[in-house]
Amino acid sequence: MRTLAAVFALVAASSATAAPGLWRIADADTEIVLFGTVHALPAATAWLTPRIGARVDAADTLVLETVIPDDRGVLGQLIASLAYSPKLPKLETRVAPSRRANLLQAVRDTGLAIDALDREETWYAAIVLGDATLGKLGLAPEDGVEATLTARAGRAGKPVVGLETPAQQLGYFDTLPETDQRALLDATVDDVATARADTAKLIAAWQAGDTDAIAADFGDSLRATPVLARVLLKERNARWADWIAARLAQPGKVFVAVGAAHLAGPDSVQAMLTGKGLQVERLP
């Protein structure tokens, strides 16, 4: 998948034949359902079908990659502590020379301020540029799957827990070697020009539950940045599989919603669980 969408969001739209993937792991007194999410969507996207809603409503607990604090000031303080460093080189010098003109054009097109980006560490500047690009396409986290599921769980009085803390998630980026941060920025700049077409392809793959297509697209981009593939996908998937396997020791029903890329390909959460000898069933 193109890096812009791989790191920041998968995009989906309503479809009469939509069938996003659901998987089930269970024992005698525990049921865990896995669902691949899209983090940012156009407003009023219809994706919460009766099939998905029934599984969400049957669960005792909603589990997400992370839970964003209600007080956004807390998140802002965390970002400020990680994403800014003194005396950074100008951002345009942190991309390949052949990409500098495209970077500056993307900054202008999204309405960002290059002076502000210059003060940001490379990984965070890439995220900001990626998010701004998706926003320009009309995609917002407030309309994404996680926001919808969180609100639904809140109305039902159900607990919402995270597999990771926000600090852990941001830390994965912050601890990347600068070489890989710059590779991420290069890839993001490349993706800006084709973001609309790339997300259109992912719409079809996600709505069809086509994990092979999702995995192939992610693989295409992450092969250029193998550290990202290891840190952001494989190692996290392994930790989440450990969590799920351990959770089977407690009775109840759990709905686990994580980015669709984590449930696709040879290093998917399902593959990790199968490697532990657990049976993973894809639900119809």
Image: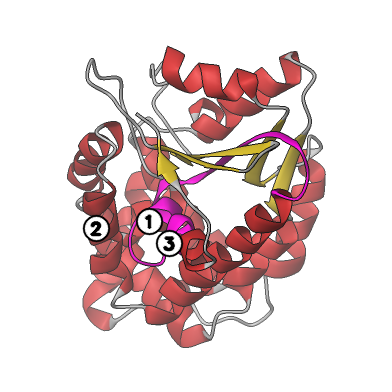
Q: Position of residue 269 (x, y in %)?
A: 49, 58
Q: Are marks 2 and 1 in contact (CB under 8 Å)?
A: yes
- Local crowd size for mark 1, using a 10 Å CA cut-off: few (<14), some (14–19), many (≥20): many
Does the rendering let one see residue 248?
yes
User: Residue at the spot x=46%, y=49% of the render?
Assistant: 280
The magenta span reads 248-271
From the image, state whether disc 2 or disc 1 is nearer to you. 2
Q: Position of residue 185 (x, y in %)?
A: 40, 70
Task: Residue type at mark 3: give it.
Answer: Ala
Q: Which residue is mark 3?
A: 271
253 displayed left or right of 229: right
Q: CA distance from mark 2 to mark 1?
A: 9 Å
- Local crowd size for mark 2, using a 10 Å CA cut-off: few (<14), some (14–19), many (≥20): many
Q: Which residue is mark 2?
A: 217
Q: Position of residue 19 (x, y in %)?
A: 30, 28
Q: Up-down: is 173 above or below 76?
A: below
Does the rendering let one see residue 114?
no
Q: Secondary structure at mark 1?
A: helix
Residue 250 drawn in magenta: yes
Q: Which residue is mark 1?
A: 6
Task: Residue type at mark 2: give it.
Answer: Asp
Q: Quadrant of residue 236?
A: bottom right
- Label whose residue precedes the other's in the sequence (1 or 3): 1
Q: Up-down: is 48 above or below 33?
A: above
- Label whose residue precedes the other's in the sequence (2 or 1): 1
